Amino acid sequence: MNASLPITDRGGRQLSSSAKLGSAVLAAHPKRHSALVRVTHWITTVAFLALLVSGAEIVLSHPRFYWGETGNVNMRPWLNLHLPSSRDTVPTGYGYVLPDQNGWSRYLHFQAAWLAVATGLFYLLFGFVAGHFRRNLFPVASDLSLKELGGSLVRHLRFERPGREEAWSYNVLQRLTYLLVIFVLFPLMIWTGLAMSFGFTSEFPLAVRLLGGQQTARSLHFLVTILLVLFLLIHVLMVFVAGFRNRMRAMITGRATPSTE
C-alpha cells in the first residue's frame, strides 16, 4: 500500500503528502535571505554592472597599464590591451579613433561607485550588528579542515547539485569566497579607486603612497576588477547548477525549496 496518500484541502483539491511535507519544511525554516540582504544584493548588482560598463569606457581612453606614479605613451606598459582608443594621442595601431565617451562614463562611474560604497557600508553595519556574518558567513573550525575544504572543492568542480541542507546555508567554499569579496576585494577596489582621484590624494596623500603611485593604483584597480568579474561569472554559473529558479526565488522572495533529490 502506498504510504504517500493524497490529502484533500478545503477546496476539494488533492494534495500529496510530499507537497504537504514541503510546505511544512518551508514553514519550519526561516527565510533563506533576510530582506536587507536581498535589497543590498540587488542594489550592489546594479551598481557593479554600471561600474563595469562605465569603467570599460574609461579604460578605452588609455588601454595601457603601468606601475609607479606616472605612465604615458612614451613609457613601456606592463599590460597593453591592444584595443582601439578614444583618444587620438594614444597610438594603438588602428586606423581610427573611437568616439570619446569619457564625459558620461566618468559621471556614471562616480555615481555608481558611491552607491556601491553606501550600500556596502550599510550591509557591513547590518552584518555585524544583526549577527549575519557570525551566523551565515564565518565558518566554524571543523569546516576549515583539509578534508572538508577538499571535499567541497571536488563537489564544486564536479558541478554537483547542492543537497537539502544547503537550501538554508552556505557551504564552506561559499563562505570563504564571500568573505574574501566582502572584506578584501571590495575594500581594495574602493581604496584603489580613491587613490586615482587627485582631489582625494591631495588631502590624503598616504592613500596613494602606500600603494606605490597612482598608476599602480590604476593597475591594481583593473586586476581587482578582473577578479570580481570572475567571481560574478562563477557565482552565476553555480546558481544555474544549484537550480536557477529556486535560487532566484530565494534572493527575490527570501523563500527556498530544498531539493527532493
Image (cartoon, helix red, strand yellow):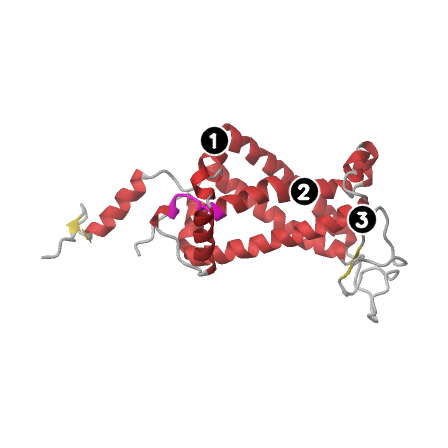
Measured along the vertical axis of the image, is residue 91 above or below residue 20?
Answer: below
* Residue type of the residue flagged with mark 1: Gly
Quick one: label 3, few (<14), some, or many (20+) residues within 10 Å?
many
Give the residue number, with chain letter if any, for mark 3. 215
Q: Along the line of sight, which residue is nearer the eye, 41 or 99?
A: 41
Task: Please identify the quadrant where the N terminus is shown.
Answer: bottom left
Q: Earlier in the sequence, mark 1 or mark 2?
A: 1
In the picture of the structure, the residue carrying the numbered disc 2 is 188
Q: Residue 92 lies in what quarter of the image?
A: bottom right
Q: Amino acid at mark 3?
A: Gln
Instruction: Tell me the magenta residue range.
Output: 166-173
Residue type highlighted by circle 2:
Leu
In the rendered view of the protein, which quadrant contains the C terminus?
Answer: bottom left
Q: Position of residue 72 (x, y in %)?
A: 87, 55
Q: Are marks 1 and 2 in contact (CB under 8 Å)?
A: no
- Whole-Å distance between the Cαs marked 3 and 1? 39 Å
156 relative to 96, above or below: above
Q: CA distance from mark 3 to mark 2?
A: 15 Å
Disc 1 versus disc 2: distance between alpha carbons? 24 Å
In what element is the residue under mark 3? helix
Residue at 67% across / 39% down in the picture?
114
* Residue bearing mark 1: 131
Q: Regarding mark 1 in the picture, which secondary structure is present there? A: loop
